[in-house]
Image: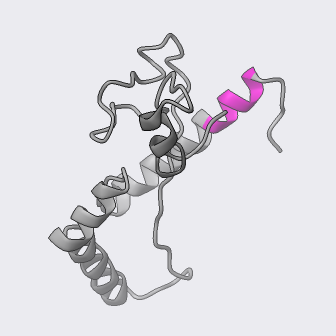
Amino acid sequence: MVEGMTILLPQVKTGRVRAYAVTSRQRSKLAPEIPTTAEAGMPKLVISSWYGVWGPPGLPDDITRQLAAAVEKAASSPDLVSRLEGLGLTTTFMKDAEFKTFIREESERGKELLRGAGFEPQ
């Protein structure tokens, strides 16, 4: 079963569920004793939730810059970072080109995982 850290970690801590690995690239700060999937022998199995902000095509550059600045400020807010880390989440801000690369790589990696499981992405 693959499920979010916030759902299963309390059960792992009480011994009701055994965690074999976390699907992130790094071990969780909330449970550093649990290995990553790469450490557990599944190096291509990396699954994590992420969120992004998009605007409509043709959004003026000045609006794009203002939105990016607001999102970057929020993503680095100590209160928000602390609250999210308490839930096992990490904030990262990526600028436009870096985020585009990330999305492209995530899409390709997802297709590869699906093909390996016998599915053909459409």
Is residue 77 something that shows in the picture? no
When the figure is inspected, residue 21 is found, relative to residue 67, above or below; the finding is above
Q: Residue at x 36, y 82 (%)?
A: 64
When the figure is inspected, residue 110 is found, relative to residue 72, above or below; the finding is above
When the figure is inspected, residue 26 is found, relative to residue 48, above or below; the finding is above
Front-lying residue, 92 or 15: 15
Identity of the residue furthest to the top in this view: 41
When the figure is inspected, residue 120 is found, relative to residue 8, above or below; the finding is above
- Quarter the C terminus occupies: top right
Query: Is the image coloured rainbow, by chain, by secondary structure, or in one colour?
Result: one colour
Identity of the residue furthest to the left in this view: 78
Q: Is residue 34 left or right of residue 42?
A: left
Q: Residue at x 28, y 86 (%)?
A: 66
Please state the horizontal and vertical placement of residue 57, each as a whole percent of the image: 56, 80
Q: Residue at x 67, y 28 (%)?
A: 113
Tell me where residue 120 sits by quadrant: top right
Q: Residue at x 20, y 72 (%)?
A: 79
Front-lying residue, 93 or 11: 11
Q: Is residue 22 left or right of residue 62?
A: right
Q: Is residue 92 left or right of residue 43?
A: left
Magenta-tinted stretch: 110-116
Tell me where residue 16 sits by quadrant: top right
Q: Is residue 19 left or right of residue 32?
A: right
Please state the horizontal and vertical placement of residue 15, each as a whole percent of the image: 49, 30
Please state the horizontal and vertical placement of residue 95, each as a whole percent of the image: 30, 62
- Helix, strand or loop for the magenta stretch, by majority: helix
Please state the horizontal and vertical placement of residue 45, each as a whole percent of the image: 56, 26
Is 86 covered by the magenta stretch?
A: no
